[in-house]
Amino acid sequence: MGVKHGLWVLNRSIWCYALLLGLSNCQAPSCTLPQFCRDGPIIDPRISNRVGNNPSQSRAQEVLVPNIVNPNPTPLPNCPPGYIPCVNVTCGSPTVQPSSQDGFATENSFPWQVFIRNNNNIAVKNGYAGGGVLLGQNYVLTAAHKISNLTSISVLLGVYRTNNLVNVQTSQVAQAWIHSNYNPTYLKNDIAILRLATPININENAMPICLPTSGSSFIGSPSTACVVSGWGQTSFALDDAPTQTLKQVHVPIVTNDQCSASYTTILGPTNAAAYLDFPNEICAGGQAQLDSCTQDGGSPLVCSTIPGQFNLVGLVLWGKDCGQPGRYGVYLNVPVYLSWIQCMFQCIAGNSNCAACPARRYL
Ligand SMILES: *[C@@H]1O[C@H](CO)[C@@H](O)[C@H](O)[C@H]1NC(C)=O
Ligand SMILES: *[C@@H]1O[C@H](CO)[C@@H](O)[C@H](O)[C@H]1NC(C)=O
């Protein structure tokens, strides 16, 4: 068949055939610095498999199947100079690895860290409302309790020093969805997803975190593997958030029994049982002065499985005091919520009803 090569393989294809072909990894392209784009040549799905099973057969024997062409391909974004449209964006791989020394973070080591802003209070502390984590160019995950009282929200990416917002990208939040079973008293199912009005461009200081495998467990991970970042308070009694510079602390992820025993001592058995929500939560920390704290809520706990690459494991939720030895920070156990997150991507994209995920729209 007289088909030109250019029709067979669309390099850095911009077209999305998800609905037609049932591809789960189909996403709109984002503007990305070339070094953070992993798109290889993408086969135009209009082309069927080769005739027969012999992979060495010539292209001339491939068959054109024109009836599955998407009549409304996703348009290419207009990217700023130096950026390219990209579908398969690098995740969780900062250009500067987090330091092994805790305290102030190194710039660009947590490019997935989001600064959530209350638009109605920008004059105070730049409107700091809590932390969040970037999941793609259009989505931010956070704790429901950080946003459930806000009526107008924006997110900032690339914030390192909170008093210097140059090279920071800001997007308004177009939609906010909260887990339908969110319990604000005990902070159960304390998860929310924000759909951004303007996509984030992917670069050294703004990169999505990798999502973990559904149902995977990070319990027992040592503190060398896991690190939490945020601008929260430096002690329980001192409201100094957001700190001027992003901070980090490595924490081990302990067993549910260890955490339960600690909270039973601190809160008594009734309260400990009422507050702790395993396996939907995990506990981490326990070392003196090495802990997340008040106003770190919604910020990400990430663990490295492949050297140099981090997965989202937790979101800061709650704890009793901060940095006390033998006491643990309690985090949302993200792998348990992976199907909820994926359901939210699908329904917000218009492919299903978010009530089934289950989630309710808040903004
Ligand atoms: C993205 O690129 C990586 C690295 O080339 C590859 O391993 C992965 O399968 C790709 N993902 C998708 C969804 O194409
Ligand atoms: C949200 O508002 C309610 C009622 O105004 C208040 O009781 C609650 O403490 C607020 N929650 C947060 C997280 O600020």
Image: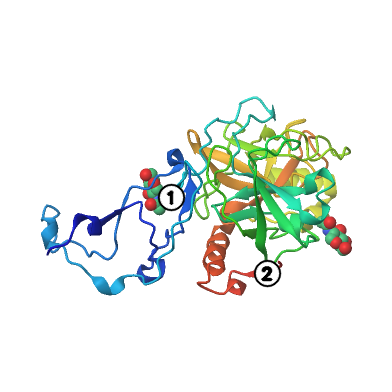
What residue is at 21 percent from the left and 62 percent from the top? Answer: 49
Q: Name the element at disc 1.
A: strand
Quadrant location of residue 360? bottom right
**In the depicted view, which residue is nearer to us: 223 or 66?**
66
Q: Quadrant of the C terminus?
A: bottom right
Q: Is residue 319 left or right of residue 168?
A: right
The correct choice, above or below, for 170 with respect to 3 in the image is: above
Q: Which mark is residue 77?
A: none
Q: Which mark is residue 361?
A: 2
Q: Which quadrant of the render holds ligand 2?
A: bottom right
What residue is at 79 percent from the left and 45 percent from the top? Answer: 126
Which residue position holds label 1?
86
Can residue 133 be seen from the camera position used here? yes
**What amino acid is labelled 1 in the image?**
Cys
Q: Residues within 10 Å of mark 2 (few under 14, many from 20)?
A: some
Quadrant location of residue 291? top right
User: How many numbered marks does the figure carry?
Assistant: 2
Q: Earlier in the sequence, mark 1 or mark 2?
A: 1
Whole-percent x and y of residue 282? 66, 48
**In the depicted view, which residue is nearer to us: 215 or 68?**
68
Whole-percent x and y of residue 287? 73, 32
What residue is at 22 percent from the left and 65 percent from the top? Answer: 48
Q: Is residue 42 left or right of residue 352?
A: left
The correct choice, above or below, for 339 with respect to 164 in the image is: below
Mark 1 or 2, closer to the camera: 1
Residue reaching furthest right?
Answer: 237
**What amino acid is labelled 2 in the image?**
Arg
Q: Disc 1 to disc 2, how far (Cα)?
A: 29 Å
Q: Residues within 10 Å of mark 1 (few under 14, many from 20)?
A: many
